Image (spheres, rainbow, N blue to C red):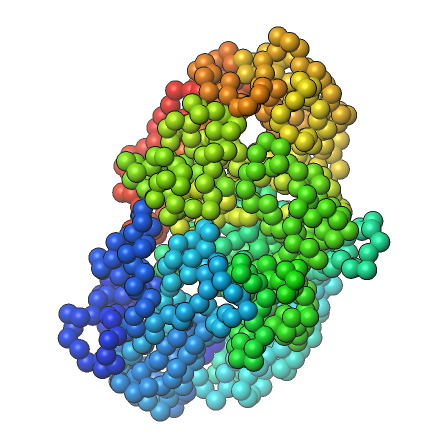
Amino acid sequence: MAERIALSGAGWQIAGFHGEDWRFRTAYRRETKVKDHEWLPATVPGSIHWDLLKAGEIPDPYFERNSRLVEWVHQRHWAYRREITIPEDWAGRRIRLRFDGIDYEAEVFLDGELVGEHESMFRPAVFDITDKATPGATHLLVVIIKDAPREWGQLGHTSTVHTGKARMGYWWDFATRLVNLGLWQDVWLEAAGPCDIRNVWVRAYQDGTVRVATLPTAGDVSVEIRDPAGAVIASGEGTDVTLRVADPQLWWPHTLGAQPLYTALVTVPGDSRGVTFGFRTITLEQNPWPYESEEKPLPYTFTVNGQRLFVKGFNWVPIDHMYGRPDLGERYAQLIEQAKAAGANLLRVWGGGLIERERFYDLCDREGMLVWQEFIQSSSGSDNTPPSDDAFLALLEREADAIIPLRRNHPSLAVWCGGNELMDGKMHPATTAEPALALLARKVAELDPDRFFLPTSPSGPIFGCGDENPNPARQHDVHGPWHYRGPIDSYLPYNASTALFHSEFGTQGCLAPASLDRAIAPANQWPPNDTNPHWVHHGAWWMQQHRVKELFGDEAATTIERYWRLSQFLQAENLRYGVESNRRRWPVCSGTIIWQLNEPWPNSHCTNVVDYYLRPKMAYYYVKRAYAPVAASLRYTSPILADGVLRVQPFIASDAPFAGKLTVTVADPAGRVWHRQEGDGAVEWPLPADCSDVIIVTLTLTDANGQVVATNPYLFSRASAPIFGALADLPLADVVVGRDDDRLVLRNDGPGYAFFPAVDIDDARYYWQLSDNYPLLAPGESLSIAVTLTPRAERADTDCPHGRPAGEGPVQVKVTGWNMRPRTLSWEV
């Protein structure tokens, strides 16, 4: 490619390429020659909040209610500066400054002279400075970041949105008000000859056809196709070349196959560019539809290389409020790996957040994770209709013209979507009858015609799931619910659903103590309800204490240590049931996308299954079981056995034909087995009078060789409210903790069940993942858990500001549970 020098770097290192690195200060005047002590070290890419935090100018906005103390930051102008030295051998070449992402509006100066202005988060800003930059000379680059535009957060009027800025930062139910500003993506100094490549578009298909289109300024173009090993396997010349590769290795989602990545190398005199791509064909096909309706459904069955798949997805939100932070690379990798390990095959990038950084899409390409990418539009509560004024439509077209070419070469990108929960004037999911969505549909057809465009999510024609919308013929793609609604109402929408696709639903759960302590001081953690201002600030929409008391009683949750487990159990139970319900209806229902995988800051309660500190909640492991290639589930109306009779219907869901055996076992908390039956026939079993009120129903799948491939336990009760009150005073189980090579072994040597043993590692030196967690262990039962520890190269920055010091010596693995004494095991790495 054209010769480039990265201008990214950390002023904190006081080192780097060509002179002084980045520094920043308040831009209360335009002049740039000010006293040096007024300039503080900065990091690019970065965020103004991150730089202020590192400089000690603001408190940690993620701790307690500190974010309210930094809301002034986005109301200021800020200046960033650094020196740049132009290489002498760049004489006679065109010299450009390229900003991959400026948040949001800026003026750029070189030696005090304005070289250009820019307004957009997602369109790169490119300035030709050939006439101002002298080869061999050092110049002063100054960028003035203007104060943030006024915009709506979650509550407002979508129809009056006037920017393309990420709206999450203006406050959302899972995010505080922290409006970003800064140079949030890389900055480059570029030199080009008379010919340079502006854009390369690679379209590759499963039959081996590959079409490479190049937008150069001038000159002859040559194209080489290289296989994953780097060998040249096809070549041609021209700005629009069609080549054929014999027997290509196909790119697949990781649940279906491998992810071989090829390279198209495009060369013009004085410039070249390599583009990674994969051979695959992705289409959306019609779902089976048994209803007569004038409203023909859109296609929702994702088909890759001719093979249909059930979408097992997570909704993805920005991984940090300060999304320009320079130390997020490993967080991206860990979160995508956690999604993959849970069995997910698709991430929906939510329209209130970001067109993600290039690293995200590269990782999805490599890991085999499909991407549903939304344009930056979202609902607002008061009205959810996309703007239709000329100024906004012109802005939207400029954004689409830049965004689509930047992302279309990624094989993981499966579908474009107009935005999140956009509605028409009657509060029905919007269609391309809305001018903004018609424009985006036209731009996708023009710039990326091989990909499907969905107008919004949900795409309707009605919004909600199941009992909220009783007309079964109108449930195509739906959203909701998002709360645990009690032991009866929580199951109604899923049991009543006839949806073809369920692109968003969730349930809240509390933070685990090791994470909660980093967000709220222990002295301020009780009570976990709306009388506690810290809990309100970190999760006002998601309070849950009343539900925990409803099911487990007032005495069951009298401390945070007891409360968080029960809150996470309610989240796990409800999310699991929603996933299992949708999966049971395949192929009529072709996918389910949980709200949400992650969160951008630590919420005390929230609908994410992995918390801000990358600690999976109980729900993560329950969803992982539901997303497994072979899974067993139960259909029921409620965990309450009102007449003392267990009535459930077992199901087996499998990605491929399964020839094993299903066993249903009913036991009490003391470990006594009361009933057992084989097969997926309906269970109708009256509880004997001397059986405990609370029972555990466990589904066990064994393969043809008798090996257990899956277990799935459920709790039921015939007691009056609180239905699970008997669990408050269970006798202590005797859980033995040991190590077998790289596996942690939990064994229940007690006479009764061990409820929800939770394995936790809190060591800043490592990222960690577990193959399983939070089991219900029967007497004599063991669970072997694979433990993966990954050293954190980015530890220093990741742990500042809201981290903990790195430990020393062996890693301490802690195991706690509802009815067990805590255990700690020293783990030598």
Task: Write the residue at 44% across / 25% down.
Answer: 554
Q: Quadrant of residue 651?
A: top right
Q: Quadrant of the C terminus?
A: top left
Whether residue 347 sits left or right of residue 816 in the image: it is: right
The mark total stands at 0
x and y, in percent, of residue 641 in the image: 65, 22
Name the residue at the right extreme.
Answer: 292
158 or 801: nearer the viewer: 158
| Any part of residue 149 in sight | yes
x and y, in percent, of residue 343 in the image: 59, 43
Task: Write the residue at 28% across / 36% down.
Answer: 523
276 or 632: nearer the viewer: 632
Q: Quadrant of residue 666?
A: top right
764 or 485: nearer the viewer: 485
x and y, in percent, of residue 126 in the image: 43, 80
Task: Write the residue at 56% across / 45% down.
Answer: 482
